[in-house]
Amino acid sequence: MPSRKPFIVSTKPTKQVVVSSLTKDATVRACIFDLIDNSIDAARNRIFKDLAENQSRNLPDSFEGFRISLQLNGSGLKIQDNCGGITVDDLRDMVLRFGRVSSHELGIGVFGVGLNRAIFKLGRTAHLKTDTGNQRAELVLNIEQYIADDDNWDLPAEEFESSGQIGTELEIRQPPEEISQEFADSNFAEKIRAEIGRRYGRFISKNLSINVNGVPVTAREVSMRENGPFPIENKFYRTPGGVDVYIKVGEHSEHRFSGENGYDREKNKQLTEEYGWTVYCNDRAIIVADTTRTTGWDTKFHSEFYGFVASVSFVAADPSKLPWLTTKTDVDLNNAAYKAALDDMRKFAERWRTFTDRYKKNRKAQSLAIPPAPQKRSEERAPHQTTEERTKSPTPSTKPATGKVGHNSLRYVLPEDISEHHCNDKFLEIVREAKSLDIGVHPYAGLALIRMLFEFSVTIYMIRVGKDAELKDFAMTKRSEKSGKAITSPNSFSPRLEEVLAYLQEHPETWGPLKANHVKTSINKLAKQSPLINGALHNPFQAVHRSLVFQIRDESLHALRHLIEQPFPTS
């Protein structure tokens, strides 16, 4: 019987292969951005550390007091911050581990390769100094010596007594010749400063200080035109995976349509590089002013889209769910949240096309110029509420949606956290209006909007579940019985509130067994209020106190939420 000698086959990679695969496709800019990402994550962690345990973690409203300084020259790169420092345990076990996934809540550093990639890409030596205010440590890395020793993957570091100055400094020296020439070029510093302004504009707008070679970086997020011919449109929803999606579409603030005062064809053309979609992940811009298939432009971007600017923002506590690739300069088209948003992005671009086509036809037929936007009237301020609070919309630069809003503190027809995923076109506009109309200031308009919203919500919901024809037949029968006359124009027929409510009362299976009992109460209460609603809206002498409008809103809110948010009856 032949003898057998077992042995082990090594699959241990060489450092050269690991480093090469890590840095091969990374640009110099992407490496610099990785270092800035790390500083911002440290700042956010420090902000969260100061929050009470029961406070929710949202994208911070302010980075006041945090500073990042970047120095570039032919000898290398130095980045300094006061954003939090690295603990000895993290430096020992996590920060430089290849591929160790980040655990930063709402972070922008996620893949665990950014610091390594920058160090190995940008130079031959690296010196890291960090201080948390309690612990101080230093690490020096000679990259050529490190790569040459495949048997030892550990790095020596030293711990010192804290200086009390919180922050981190990383100096990377002896860059490759081509990178050294870039760093020595003042034009490169100017370009990287402008790019940082675009990629990190939202952080800078929240008072994060970033400077390059001593010159402050200014935010370069493209602004949208207020009160222009094309109104700013918004949409918000949360995906099943827990990613909040915010879409905002409008006209470039400096763009003007032909026929308007200030129209300049050449100026509109010069703004071309700022048109298109910008994609954000946890406030970090991934792609900027994109007009390619990546953001849904299935046809070539041309002059009819001049002026179009839009953003889609993805927010998630777990950054691994966000649609970015490892370089964070492109999106993952297979990401579930991005695929959900892409359909809406195409629809918004098509709405812009429809608007511009209609506008051109109107001008050609009637030679009409767009009148100037009216001056805003001074509005009555709701009690205990600032103007900013009354007009606030769910912009991604503030906070992601959290839990459902309690009705006792809600002044609007709808709360902001209502998902708009299944809302489009006119219905989306009505839902957005409902989120901004203050019942306390406009009770009768609020009552009319509640009625319109309910009728529309039921109609759209029934279309989604394939029962729109059944509802229409039911409503036509009810109206014919009441009037004693047959419906002569069934194609233009629309169910009224009382007919919709009667259908829902007689067909509780519409909601599915888990929702039936909860929604039934809401429907029954609203049905009792239906005569009062009709009287208040049609009888010029019937007054309704705003407190009753709030009550009607509260009684209808449970059913409205289900109608607007749910794609199908749950079981």
Image (tube, rainbow, N blue to C red):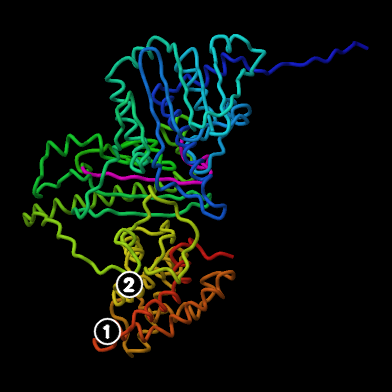
Instruction: Give me the disc on residue 449.
Output: 2
Q: Position of residue 304 (x, y in %)?
A: 20, 43
Q: Position of residue 359 (x, y in %)?
A: 16, 53
Q: Secondary structure at mark 2?
A: helix
Marks 2 and 1, how far apart at CA: 14 Å
Circle 2: is it few (<14), some (14-19), or many (20+) Cα within 10 Å? some
Work out whether 137 lies above or below 185.
Answer: below
- Sequence-wise, the earlier of marks 2 and 1 is 2
Mark count: 2
Q: Is residue 314 magenta?
A: yes
Q: Which residues are magenta?
A: 307-324
* Residue 316 horizontal/vertical position (percent): 49, 46
Give above or below for 59 relative to 291.
below
At 36% from the left and 51% from the top, the residue drawn is: 395
Q: Nearer the viewer, residue 539 or 446?
A: 446
Asked which quadrant contains residue 436, the reply is bottom left
